Amino acid sequence: MLLMTPGPTPVPEFIRFAMAQKSVHHRTSEFEAIFSSAREGLKRFTKQAEVLLLASTGTGAMEAAVTHFCKTRILTVNAGKFGERFTKIAKAYGKNPLELKYEWNTPASIEDIESALKSDPNIDAVAIQICESAGGLRHPAEEIAKRAKEIRSDIFIIADGITAVGVEPIDASNIDALIAGSQKAFMIPPGLAIISLSQKAVDHLDKNGGSGFYFNLATELKNQRKNTTAWTAATTLVQGLDAMLKRIEEIGMEKFYADTRKRHTAGLEALKAMGLFIYPKTPSLAMLTVLHNDAANLRKWMKKEAFVNVGGGQDDLKDKLIRINNMGLVEPSNTAWSINALEIALHKANIRTFDGVGSKVFCERYFA
Ligand SMILES: *Cc1c(COP(=O)(O)O)cnc(C)c1O
């Protein structure tokens, strides 16, 4: 079965091997060397001052960012399940979120952010997804971060880059907490969250200390500067992460990003050539997202007969979206096969006569 869901992504063989090495104790120089290498590798991705690894899924890092970088009120952007999650976290901690709500296919507008910030001087943090995975949508997060800082220079910007870091280069110069996760572009199993910090965020933690206990970022910062963790590290996952970061550097980060973009462009054109409707107005490179009334049945056929598991939607769009992963080291042949399988599924469902145009356009655009 080909796993082509936009997270968890398949774990490549070289990463499985790296994680199959003998267990190392987390309080040893052997592990500290691996941990240090992974941390330095991540810093080359985010180009930020610090990076912390947490033993949790991405949501743990979202929660830690909200508890540490918002004191009075947070502005959240809800254009899907993950933006909604920031609102829920903020509510759980009494941060009185001001939520901007959008259709799941619609990116946040800079003007809306501006007027929201101007409407309430108590807003001291903004939380936004770079890619909102619910609809495969790319928000103009970097521009929003820049504008927000122009309006309020001491504001903290929290960016959920879980389906953006490792997908495309992110300009993190106005982002204070950039979040990533293990099971998306880094292709390691779920359970490791990454939170990359600006110098301003680091200074804030050093000066004010952290909050909470397990997800106390000041405690983690103190430890991780010495390449150890406050609690037991997710040693196996860190070994996998380090292997992936090294592989990407062997390939070359620019080529890695260029391949992701090329697969995405070729995939979008192939799907359009099949007459399909691309759901997000600003598609994220993380996935190929199609809106179709028969999405649930098409996916079912693809899985049962073509052995390819692609993602569906959530909530109201549960049976209406098809999301094909494009994060990580995806073989172009796997993207081509997924598109081809979808085209056959459309034929089997008497929706469209198969003519092979999906595969043809993908191969022309990608290889020719
Ligand atoms: C996957 C994902 C998350 C994290 O979800 P977890 O289940 O906690 O790993 C957060 N934000 C986005 C945009 C995601 O795609």
Image: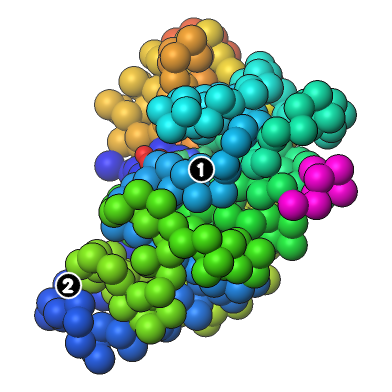
Q: Quadrant of ligand 1?
A: top left
Q: Say which amino acid is labelled 1.
A: Val
- Percent x, y of residue 225: 43, 79
Q: Is ligand 1 less than 8 Å from the beta carbon at label 2?
A: no
**104 horizontally vs 223: left or right:** right
> Which residue is denoted by mark 1 in the rendering?
66
- Percent x, y of residue 70: 57, 43
**140 horizontally vs 69: left or right:** right
Q: Residue at x 66, y 64 (%)?
A: 200
Q: Is residue 150 magenta?
A: yes
**The one of 283 and 199 positioned closer to us in this rendering:** 199
Check residue 20 in the rendering and tell me which mark sits there, or answer none: 2
SS for callout 1? helix
Q: Say which amino acid is labelled 2.
A: Ala
Question: Residues in magenta?
Answer: 148-154
| Between discs 2 and 1, the one toward the N terminus | 2
- Percent x, y of residue 151: 86, 43
Q: How many marks?
A: 2
Q: CA distance from mark 2 to mark 1?
A: 35 Å
- Percent x, y of residue 210: 44, 57
Check residue 125 in the rendering and tell me which mark sits there, or answer none: none
**The one of 122 and 16 positioned closer to us in this rendering:** 122
